[in-house]
Amino acid sequence: MNGSELKILDWAALDADAQAATLTRPVQSVAAQTRESVAALIEQVRGGGDAALRAISARFDGVAPEDFEVGEAEFAAAERAVSAELRIAMQQAAGRIDAYHRAGMAQPYAVETAPGVVCEKMIRPIGRVGLYVPAGSAPLPSTALMLGVPARLAGCREVVLCTPPRKDGSADPAVLVAARLTGVHRVFKIGGAQAIAAMAYGTETVPSCDKLFGPGNSYVTEAKQQVAQAGAAAIDMPAGPSEVLVIADAGANPAFVAADLLSQAEHGPDSQVLLLSDDAALLAAVAGEVARQVAVLEREAIARQALSASRLVKVQSLDQAFEISNRYAPEHLILALRDPRPWLAQVEAAGSVFLGDYTPEALGDYCSGTNHVLPTAGAARAYSGVSVASFQNQISVQAASAEGIAGIGPCALTLARAEGLGAHANAVALRLGVTL
Ligand code: HSO
Ligand code: ZN
């Protein structure tokens, strides 16, 4: 790559349509064929249970395990297969993820809204949750940590995890160790849309779950959407390819910025990479660095594909960069700025923000403590990343005494009459001892 593959655009020179096109994600619409094959897979699992799972697994994964569930012997083998260094890193990461998520846990509360009227909020774990940990081009044990830790903090009664089997029928050992570390109760070697179907509807061996979490390819994402639509299970958030937007000033380090862009680009050919800067020289320097660094990546081919849809944009001011970023609502937002913190006030929509030169996205992906399961595809405008609250239900409670209803009952009566709902009015009037 000579750098020319990295398009540097001048925002001010683009008309409104071209600006909109610059911020448009590559086609997100799922091919009708994908939709249909996912629907067929879900039906197959729903009707055929474990036998269907076995047949689908043989077809797509090339293995049909007799027993999908990971047993003690396989967990023990995984413990032996994972190096002490990796285990310690996962333990340390889990500790920081725990600390961050614990601090953000919602607290129950009670408030007296009128004399004799107490309204409360109580928090309950979602009973049974299903975590999906992909293992496509790269198994992601860190995703098991990001989902398993908040599930445990929430206190979910049963935490189920599905991950695709490898060619030899075993699961990725690091994913298994991560699952155990976080207290996941049961792990099944099932991948793709069939895993989502199994966790949503249940089979003879896989329990049906109330809510499903985790990233995946377009089949997994489509399957999550379909089971949610059918009311079979709730899902964490709409998902799509991973993305990063970097806002850099003239003082940013081009090598650092390029490395951050590439760490996103290597995730998949459809990853999204955007750089906004008010400094033309910085943009050119980053383009050069990207060209240099990409050539030595193990996942060079994947990164190059993602880069072909990347954009480097010259903006007129940093204020304008933040306007554009808010419009795009990136999953990850890196502020490679000399004094980044004051700019946080301008951030309205983003999944997770990384401040300054020494906070690469990779830290948040693995071990700073924040969650890496984040809203993509602009969903950050209205969705937040996974947290303990994602694994909990908040239930409101209220109690009124005779004095309480005497005080606020007339208010309810007026509203009930306005809505023409006589039974509502009656339910209050009876307690007040008034005749309507
Ligand atoms: N950047 C990915 C998470 C990840 N990165 C896992 C490395 N492993 C989506 O936020
Ligand atoms: Zn990543």
Image: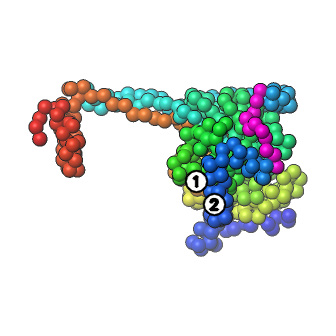
Check disc 1 and report the residue beneath it: 226
Look at label 1 and name its amino acid.
Gln
The residue tagged with tag 2: helix, strand or loop? helix
Q: Residue at x 10, y 37 (%)?
A: 435
Q: Earlier in the sequence, mark 2 or mark 1?
A: 2
Q: Residue at x 16, y 36 (%)?
A: 429
Q: Position of residue 98 (x, y in %)?
A: 64, 29
Image quadrant for the C terminus? top left
Q: Residue at x 30, y 32 (%)?
A: 113
Q: Which residues are magenta?
A: 61-72
Above or below, 185 relative to 206: above
Q: Is residue 204 visible?
A: yes
CA–CA distance between discs 2 and 1?
9 Å
Q: Position of residue 161 (x, y in %)?
A: 68, 37
Look at label 2 and name its amino acid.
Arg
Query: Is 71 inside the magenta-drawn segment?
Result: yes
Image quadrant for the N terminus? bottom right
Check disc 2 and report the residue beneath it: 35
Nearer the observer, 105 or 245: 105
Q: Is residue 262 visible?
A: no
Residue farthest left in this picture: 435
Query: Is 383 inside the magenta-drawn segment?
Result: no
Q: Position of residue 96 (x, y in %)?
A: 67, 30
Q: Residue at x 65, y 35 (%)?
A: 160
